[in-house]
Image: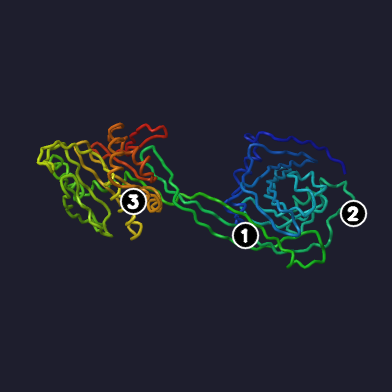
Amino acid sequence: MLFSCTKDDLQDNTTNPIVNQLKNDLKLEQFTNKNIADNLVVNWETFSKIEKDGFEIYEIEVSEKKPTQIESNLFQNQLKYELIAIKKGTEIHSYLVEAYTSLNHTLFSNSIENLSNFIGTLNVFQLNGTSLGQLVIFNGHSKNTTEKNIIEPLNDIINLHNFNQSATNKAPECIETYIVYTYALENTNHYSSVTVGNYTKLTYRNTTQETIITTSFMNTPYPCGTNGDSNYILYRTTISRDVVDVVIDPCEKLKAQYNNPIYKAKIDVLKTQTGQTKENGYAQTKDGSFTTLTANGSDAVTLPRDINRIGYMHTHLDSYQKTNAEGELIDVFPIKIFSPEDVKQFLILIINAQNYGNPISDTYGVLVSSAGTYQLGFTGNAADINVKANTINWGESLDKIYITTILENGLEKGLLKFLIDKIGIDGIELYKIEDTGNKKITLDINGKKITINCN
């Protein structure tokens, strides 16, 4: 039998209807094999097309993001994958092929017309993940071991390309079946997504691991007469995937707070008290109730420990005069934004929320001054606080660095820069609360202050 054969490699798929159909039909996420579902990448940009005796054969190479490892005394330790479509007239058959190569033989070449030196097994799947069976290849000759008609077109096409091989190279009659154990270690990286207006930030939270063990049967053309139970394949792969499983909308949280008439009333009271000579404040517990905070001298309030406490609000005062220890009247210039001690108390609330099962997204700190009303929120990983907060040298030396940073950069930028440079805990968010709308204040990658409006 004679054929005319032409081949066009690395063609542009943007207008090819067969390749576009493959792209639409392939559903990797539906495969139960985790390596196929999560570890394969299809090179849709190029494809190979073979025309032979009225058939059009399309082949698209598929690669692994992270190569698997096979431990076997039957097969090589490398897997190969390929998408194949066979068209004749209006009839189209499409497959995903997983190729196992026998030891000491040429790897699957990603071309069914170049299998003269290939010995191994092709696992054949529909594009929706359904297993169709296996073809055993022996020096280019294919045998359908499952005898399912649905893979006969692929079986015939492989044999069609090897019509001139000698009869001694045909696939052997002796086909052994072996057990395949697949160990897939799945690493799932968990992230939270924070969206404010047109600003979105992903924050890593933690990684979980799961070992998924599956068994299947593999047919191989040789060696015949051996014990299949002792010749199983140990097939390992590690899959990594990213999951956004916490979606945080601080703007909605702020809106809900300020729509609470009790909460709003407390803020309004504090706005009238910034001209006094002692700080005022309130603490809120998770049942929604508020308690009045006790002034600790003229420039501090005491925040009692309570496992049910979720937030606090307090004032920073306008400039005033006080008498010092020597009896002299001195001017006091409070800084009208969060202090290091305010940040410390906020972090303590976050740790309490984590330890006692309170929602971290409900935890807050509020500062009311004549320069504005500011609120702290947390969208990071609470575990980072335990690691980093204890390494911070809280106290007078840190306060001096804070004051210098504020004086050099201004209130908002200075605080943000201080949080980054000296606190170093990712996820502390600063918001400014205004009657015209709430705003997130942050620094871009160049250290420039940017303001993002809540929608």
Q: Mark 2 vs mark 3: which is more N-terminal?
A: 2
Report helix, strand or loop for mark 2: helix
Residue 146 visible at all: no
Image position of 219 with respect to 341: above or below: below
Q: Mark 2 vs mark 1: which is more N-terminal?
A: 2
- Tell me which amino acid carries mark 3: Ser
Q: Which residue is mark 3?
A: 361
Q: Residue at x 42, y 46 (%)?
A: 193
Q: Cα distance, mark 3 to mark 1?
A: 38 Å
Q: Nearer the viewer, residue 260 or 102?
A: 102
Q: Cα distance, mark 2 to mark 1?
A: 37 Å
Q: Mark 3 vs mark 1: which is more N-terminal?
A: 1
Answer few, some or many: residues within 10 Å of disc 1's Cα (few below 14, many 20 plus, some between 14 and 19). Answer: some
- Tell me which amino acid carries mark 2: Thr
Q: Residue at x 54, y 54 (%)?
A: 187
Residue 221 visible at all: yes
Q: Which residue is mark 1?
A: 183
Q: Residue at x 13, y 39 (%)?
A: 275
Residue 176 in percent (x, y) is at 78, 63
Report helix, strand or loop for mark 1: strand
Q: Is residue 3 toward the left or the right of residue 110 in the image?
A: right
In the drawing, what numbered circle is on residue 168? 2
